[in-house]
Structure formats: C-alpha cells, structure tokens
Image (spheres, coloured by chain):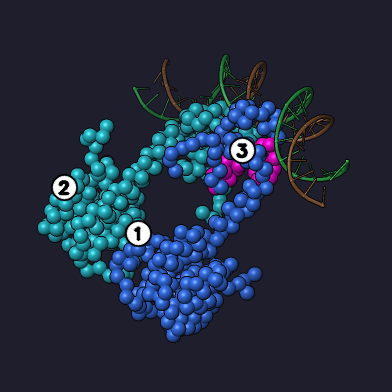
Chain colours: A cyan, B blue, C green, D brown
Amino acid sequence: MTSEEPAGCVCIIDDDAELRSALGSLFRSSGLDVALYEGTEAFLAAGVPSTACCLVLDIRLGGENGLDFQERLVSQGIGIPVVLMTGHGDIPMTVRGMRAGAVDFLPKPFGDEQMLAAVAAAIERDRTNRAAAAGTAELRNCYQSLTPREREVMALVVTGLMNKQVAGRMGLSEITVKIHRGNVMRKMEAQSLADLVRMAEQLGVRDASIHRFST
Amino acid sequence: MTSEEPAGCVCIIDDDAELRSALGSLFRSSGLDVALYEGTEAFLAAGVPSTACCLVLDIRLGGENGLDFQERLVSQGIGIPVVLMTGHGDIPMTVRGMRAGAVDFLPKPFGDEQMLAAVAAAIERDRTNRAAAAGTAELRNCYQSLTPREREVMALVVTGLMNKQVAGRMGLSEITVKIHRGNVMRKMEAQSLADLVRMAEQLGVRDASIHRFST
DNA sequence: GGCGATATCATACGCAGGTTTCGGGTGCCT
DNA sequence: AGGCACCCGAAACCTGCGTATGATATCGCC
C-alpha cells in the first residue's frame, strides 16, 4: 500500500520556459509528479488531475493575469489549492490573492525550501478537501436515487414535521407519506432519523416551500 | 429604532499620536465611534466593545509586534476583525496577516476611502459574527440548564439510538430514559427530534463514550 | 430535620412511526 | 401491447415514543 503511491502532483503555469523546467526538476526530485503549462488555456484543456495536487501559478503571464485566473477558478468551483508567485508583486496584489484563498504568495526570487514547503501545504490541503468531497459525493449519489416525491417528503421530514403534517402539506394520506419516508431511509442508507437530518444538513436539503431571507 | 444606533466602533492601536487622532477624526466624521490606544496592553485592558466593532492595528508598534498581537488575539478566541496597516510592509508580512484572518492590509500612505472601505467591511463581518454567536449563546444557555444525566441521554439520542439502546448503555430502564429525554426536549425548547439533532450539531455535542480519531 | 433538585422505576394509555400485503392509477419506453 | 418506474392508498399489525400518576432514594443546603 505504501510503496507506489505518489506524494502528489504539482501543476505549474508560467510563461517562462526556464523557470518552468527548473521548478519541474525541483518538484520531481522531491518525489512529486509534475505537469507543466505555458498558459492558463493549456491547463484548463488538460483538466485537474484526479490525485492530490496543487497549482503553482505565476501572476504575470503572457495572456491572462494570474490573479484573474485564480478568481475564475474559484467562481467556477474548481477548488485546487493555489500557490502564487511573482517577480513584481506588491501588497495589494498579495491581499487579493490571499483573499481568493491562495495557500501562499511567493515573491521572486524565492528559495527552493520555501516553494517546497508551500507546495507541501497546498497538497495537504487538497488531500483534506478531497476526503471531505468524497464523503459528500457518496451522499449525493444516494440523494440522486430518490424520486421527486421522496425528496419532497425528505425535505419536510427533516424539518421536524410529523407524517400527518407532511401529508397535509402535500395533499396526501399519511400512509403514502410513510411509504415514501421508508423509501428515503432505505435509499439514503440512514439508520435513524438523526442520521437523515445530518445528511440533509450536509447536502443543504431544505424545504423549498419555505422562503427565508437569511442564509 | 433607526435613529440612535451607531454604525459601529473602531478601535485603533498605533503608537503614532498624530496618525491616531487623524484616523479618529476620519472615522468620527463617518458616523463611527472611536477608541484610541497607544499600545496593545491599553486595548486589552479596556476590553472589546460590546457593539459591532473592528480593530485598526499598526504593525510597527513601540512594544509588541502587531502581527504577533493579531495572532495572539486569534489564539485567545478574540474574534474581532482586524485591519492591518504599516509603513514598511512586505509581501511575507502580508501573507502572514491575511492568513491570520485580517480583513485588509493597507500600506502607508493609504487614502481615506481605502481605510473607510476596509473598516466598513470589517464591521460588517463583525456584525455577522455577532449574530451567529448570539444564536449559539442562547442554545448554550439551554444546554447548561440540563443535568448531567440529561446531557448523557441527549448525546446518545442524537446519535440515533433508540430509547431502549440508550437505557442499555447507561444501565437504566427505558422509562427513565424517556423521562430524561422529555426533559431534554422541554429544556432545549426543541419542537422535534430533528430540531434537537441540529442543536447538538451546532453545540458540538457528541457521545463522549465513542472515541474517534478524526475531527 | 425539612426542602428541593436529581435520579430512579412501574403501570397504563394514546399517539406516532414503520412494515407488509393488497390494490389501483399514470406515463414512458420497447 | 407489455413491462417498468413512479405515485397513491387501505387494512392490519407491531414497535417505539411520550406523558401522566405515583412512588422511592440520595444529596446538599438552609
């Protein structure tokens, strides 16, 4: 189990070919996989690796600005941890990058150890993120196996309504609600109502008929 | 209701008396309350205001370093939003401050509008934090009114155990568990089991007899 | 000693939850 | 036309939940 697993993969986007390959060598010599890209498009075309990874991103690129690209990743839900680097950085740029969730911000020239430490932290963060995402992915899978009616019942049940109240709101008989409810418990693999409530919380399942202003 | 409420309070820690009073005037003219401190000790001695507030903190102080102080506040659970400013800042300092949760990091000289915008964002964040804290405070109040036994029962019930299982684990009869459970529901003002589960999640209540390695 | 809070348990009743078995309906895809 | 998935419902049955009534026991405090 411990012999062949890679420590992680580093994606590098930098328009300077020399620095790109130098960083590649550095990471490879630390036992990390490496993927090199000259621009943001090439990275997006290749797709995010399926293993624990991070992105080392230069801010001054040929085409798109690195900070803009980072924010685009965030807004698109691509949660890969980012290590920013730049030769001409200032404090406002640093604030912007860190606000967008960057793991670190390294002004050039930086030491090998600094970069390695930043990347190690970024990959570790990705590992944590992936573990959490894997947990909810299985849940989401179960939830998608529910029929529309079953989802409605689930939403109302986890708000604390009794079967007869759910039946009233949905215009059904209580017995039908019980059947749907039983199906929900089985499909969601919930051992108890408490379980189901926690699952609903994690999935963000709420009664759509209740319109709130908060949250 | 809307006539007398202050927009918020700004605490300023700076060893430069001139800048201190200049900032004070700036904020006051924007309708904000102001508290001025020359050092960190004076601020701690005065205590955090009870209204929505934020802290404007210079990094280069006479005694303690501003970044150290900020991290101390975080580690002590004092969650006041911080706006950092400095005359001789660099990128590593910015990274450190933002990592510690600073709202903004302003290099001197900065414009009035920049500072006002940062403070407005910080106060808004504090308002959100306080609203969330107030919600859990009331819950914690209810929880503290529970007897030790009732808390045990609550912990086991919200994990999804049935009354008879709770009774088995605690070495009680089922009827006793029911009574405790009823008391828990009344004291916690929970309308349903789903409610109670969510409360327990928010309070971090877990079965102490289950030893986990994660989280 | 008495009082109150906490904790324990029994009996009994009514309501809620959950399943099974049966039946019927729709709509869609083959 | 037949099969399938989804949706609705009734009767019967068992289990679980919740509360009321009533009782006992311990502990700490006034």
- Disc 3 packing (10 Å; few <14; some 14–19; many ≥20): many
Mark number, residue A29: 2
Q: Range of the magenta residues?
A: B180-202
Q: Position of residue B77 (x, y in %)?
A: 50, 59
- Considering only vertical position in the picture, is B49 above or below B30? above
Q: Can the viewer see residue A41?
A: no
Residue A139 vs residue A7, the one in the foreground: A7
Q: Which residue is drawn at the image coordinates 66% and 29% (left, top)? A: B172
- Considering only vertical position in the picture, is B102 above or below B197? below
Dot 3 and dot 2 residues touching (CB under 8 Å): no
- Disc 1 packing (10 Å; few <14; some 14–19; many ≥20): some
Mark number, residue A100: 1
Q: Is residue B191 magenta?
A: yes
Measured in 3D between alpha carbons, the distance from the residue under mark 3 to the one under mark 1, in whole angstroms, is 42 Å
**Viewed as shown, does residue A18 lie left or right of B22?**
left
On the same chain, marks 3 and 2? The answer is: no
Give the amino acid at mark 3.
Glu
